[in-house]
Image (tube, rainbow, N blue to C red):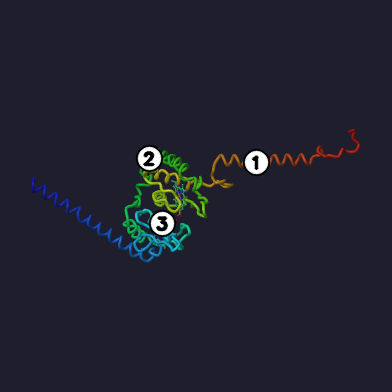
Amino acid sequence: MLMLGLVMTGSLYAAFAPAQAESAESDTELIAEGRELFLISCVFCHGQNGEGVLTEGGTQYGPSLAGVGAAAADFQLGTGRMPLVQPGAQGAAKAPVFNEDEIAALSAYVGSLGPGPAIPDEGDYSIESLDDEEREEAISRGGQIFLTNCTACHNFSGNGGAMPRGGQAPSILNTSPEHIYEAMLTGPGNMDVFSNGNLTPEEKRDVIAYIETMRDQPEYGGFGLGGLGPVSEGLFGWLVGIGGLVGFAIWIAAHSTRTTKAPMKGTDA
Ligand code: HEC
Ligand code: HEC
């Protein structure tokens, strides 16, 4: 029995230990690779060790990256915001400068600067594993959360809108689920952070499911009116529709013979 126990423990150890050692090694390799790229593309604004760089005026070229997490880096790099071309301007989403491997390396490096949110797994934001009914529930829950938490800046239709001081909340309709999750987790720029205590991972998943259905919704043409729904449509109906009718009625009244002020010749009055 003792021998068997020892052999089992030994072989189990042999089976698992090297794999762990290997992944730890490849982690440090990945981080080192990321550091190389960081030194070339990011130190100008974020400093030698990601501590951030202040200008002489006291404003920032780039903030400290300690503790922003791999998720923030994956978001910023994956949506093409970083490397920023010019300090000061809000980074716009564009085609990423780095390929997937480089983004993974840079994210690993930024993640190693301090504890912060990790890059989410597909299981965190996919509703594939749910059955039809659960999916519908998830989408309607997500809609509620979206309406209360996101529409103030991103609009009811997810098309985005203006922010104070010349900033803007971009459209979120073409953002990948992974990047939507990371945006909530890390709050880029002027966006609020929706930490897991604030919106649970499940609620984040539901919001993403809702955004995905919005994306699939056909445009019926005509004026979108910001997708505000019955309120703006009703207002439009009242002001433009009924207002137009009233205006037309006044026009008719003004041009009919009855309002002619001068008495007609040949009448008794
Ligand atoms: C206070 C306003 C505000 C709120 C509330 C807000 N956002 Fe944002 N969001 C922004 C701004 C501003 C940006 C752009 C940040 C930047 O470019 O640095 C942004 C960016 C994003 C992006 C990146 C889009 C892209 O691909 O470029 C996503 C996705 C996103 N927000 C999702 C959400 C979701 C989901 C919610 C609700 C849970 C939400 N936001 C709530 C202001 C807001
Ligand atoms: C020209 C200056 C500049 C360069 C170059 C630059 N950044 Fe940035 N970075 C900024 C600024 C400014 C912000 C703050 C953006 C904001 O708040 O909207 C920022 C924000 C970030 C954030 C988000 C921090 C947070 O709090 O969520 C990450 C991550 C990041 N940068 C990574 C990088 C990486 C990686 C590179 C190199 C590939 C890079 N940056 C290159 C200026 C720069």
Which of label 2 and label 3 is nearer to you? 3
Q: Residue furthest right?
A: 266
In the picture of the structure, the residue carrying the numbered disc 3 is 76
Which sits earlier in the primary sequence, circle 2 or circle 3? 3
What crowding class fits label 2: few (fewer than 14 Cα within 10 Å), some (14-19), or many (20 or more)?
few
Residue 131 numbered tag: 2
Residue flagged by tag 2: what amino acid is it?
Answer: Asp
Residue flagged by tag 3: what amino acid is it?
Answer: Gln
Q: Quadrant of ligand 2?
A: bottom left
In the picture of the structure, the residue carrying the numbered disc 1 is 241
**Ligand 1 neighbours mark 2 (CB distance < 8 Å):** no
Q: Determine whether 193 is above or below 23 in the image.
A: above
Q: Are marks 2 and 1 in contact (CB under 8 Å)?
A: no
Residue 18: percent from left, percent from top: 20, 56
What whole-number distance in Å separates the C-alpha atoms at marks 2 and 3?
33 Å
**Ligand 2 neighbours mark 3 (CB distance < 8 Å):** yes
In the image, what residue occupies the spot 15% across and 52% down?
11
Name the quadrant of the N terminus.
Answer: top left
Which of label 3 and label 1 is nearer to you? 3
Looking at the image, which is closer to me, 93 or 88?
88
What crowding class fits label 3: few (fewer than 14 Cα within 10 Å), some (14-19), or many (20 or more)?
many
Which of label 2 and label 1 is nearer to you? 1
**Ligand 1 neighbours mark 1 (CB distance < 8 Å):** no
Residue 259: percent from left, percent from top: 81, 38
Residue flagged by tag 1: what amino acid is it?
Answer: Gly
What whole-number distance in Å separates the C-alpha atoms at marks 3 and 1?
46 Å
Name the quadrant of the C terminus.
Answer: top right
What whole-number distance in Å separates the C-alpha atoms at marks 2 and 1?
45 Å
Residue 264: percent from left, percent from top: 88, 38
Q: Residue furthest bottom?
A: 40
Residue 139: percent from left, percent from top: 43, 41
Which sits earlier in the primary sequence, circle 2 or circle 1? 2
